[in-house]
Amino acid sequence: MADQSNSKTVAIIGFGTAGMNAAIALRNAGFGGRVLVFSDIDTLPYSPILTSYYAWGDKTYEECFPWSAEEVADLNLDILYDEPVEALDTVTHAITTSKGTYGYDKCVIATGATPMCWGFPEVEGDSAYRPLVLRSMADAQRLKDALERPGIKRILVSGASMVALKTLEACLNHGLECTLVGINPHVLDFNALPEAAIRFEKGLREKGVELRLGQSIKAVKRIGDKLEVTFSSGDTDVFDEISVAHGMKSNLDFVVEGALETDRALIVDEFMRTSDPDVYAAGDVAQATELISGEKRIVGIWKNAALQGATAGAAIAAELAGGQPDEECAFKGSISTNTIAVNGTLFISAGTMEITPERSIEVREAEDMTVVYIFENREGKPRRLVGFNLVCDKDEPGSVAYDTGAMLTLRIEAGCR
Ligand SMILES: Cc1cc2nc3c(=O)[nH]c(=O)nc-3n(C[C@H](O)[C@H](O)[C@H](O)COP(=O)(O)OP(=O)(O)OC[C@H]3O[C@@H](n4cnc5c(N)ncnc54)[C@H](O)[C@@H]3O)c2cc1C
């Protein structure tokens, strides 16, 4: 059968790492048709990972963009900048923005996620106040502007996830007095077991961070240029700014309810196909196989978004050329991995932190390092490592801590094969 794909249109909604890698894979696989990219921003794809480093001055604005204008131009894409998608009609294959309606043959949804401020109360005396959040370059600019504002001294970071801790690091590096409030009894939320989190908390306290764990923000009142915060403990304190990191929500408002199989995000197969054969999803909007649970979950990390975007692009190119996606490009699944260092205290984790009756933990303490191992003991099967946390009082690239983290991550991945 002759290759008809040159007359086809592939739409990519969202121009982050997943969208960009879908475009690269389409072209690498020889797709010569139209690639129509919808972006809600007016810049090249940026890396959310680098936003906190930009905010505290460790990276320049330009360094936050992994691809150059030349690399993007080489892909010959039709990019509609500043044109957020408002509706996707999977029945008529139509994408609507405020400027028009566009058809597609295949579509990749790669719209990432938005930071949420769940539970943050309206500020008394300043109902327009929006706390700082961190995801986009615009968020990073707002944080940077706040950190550099003359007279700013005290900041409250609400949330204890990786994003909250990255924000905290940016604030510490600006010499601010930092308080962190988290609803859970320990930092690092679902990424760490208490045995590791306690050492990380010690590191934070030594850097002067006040920790208010097991608490939340109950009320906020504007008093002049300050914000008076009442915590659920009943205590009050006064801050110049508040940053909130209460989790992320996949950007899927433009998808008609019921049109695609959805849980917390879009359920996809190993080629990133959703329940609609012409719609694919990749990155933080996709629930693909998480290897330890075997369940479909969002594993919101950069590498996954890149690999999933590449898988979607290669699979679409194959299908539009009249063939089947190659098993070699299938996304076989992933495990969660995290690395963060806050002013010299290092945390590395991989795998699961879910303790089930079949799982046990082992804690190994060294002078400057705690490693928590999570083993699974299933009848008739060899004991396997399914997760670990590592906290080190020093952050030295190339150190034993980094080597141990890399080795344990590989061990977990090998145990999943
Ligand atoms: C502060 C922070 C630190 C992080 N640190 C790490 C780390 O250290 N390591 C790691 O692996 N991961 C990290 N992550 C996670 C990682 O950045 C994400 O998993 C990854 O960027 C997801 O890529 P994506 O392409 O799915 O989404 P994004 O990169 O968010 O791209 C999605 C794009 O789609 C756009 N979009 C949204 N809605 C629409 C619409 N309706 N129409 C058109 N466009 C739209 C968005 O504006 C965005 O430009 C971090 C995330 C944050 C926020």
Image (cartoon, rainbow, N blue to C red):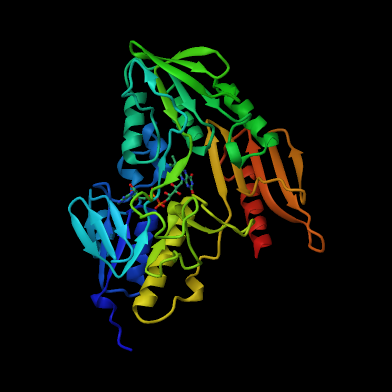
Residue 264 locus on image (x, y percent): 49, 50
* Residue 206 drawn at (x, y percent): 59, 22
**134 relative to 219, above or below:** below
Residue 377 is at least partly visible in this image: yes
Q: Quadrant of residue 154?
A: top left
Residue 2 sits in which quadrant? bottom left
Residue at 50%, 69% in the rendered image: 330
Residue 282, by quadrant, is bottom left
Looking at the image, residue 411 sits to the left or right of residue 212; the answer is right
Q: Is 178 above or below relative to 260?
A: above
Q: Position of residue 67 (x, y in %)?
A: 32, 54
Residue farthest to the front?
258
Q: Can you say which quadrant of the picture contains the C terminus?
A: bottom right
How many numbered discs sit on the rendered protein?
Answer: 0
Residue 3 falls left or right of residue 265:
left
* Residue pictured at 40% horizontal, 50% vertical: 112
Closer-to-camera residue (92/406): 92
From this viewpoint, is residue 347 visible? no
Query: For the view shown, which residue lies furthest in the bottom direction?
Result: 1
**Residue sitting nearer the eye, 410 or 353:** 353
Q: Position of residue 364 (x, y in %)?
A: 75, 40
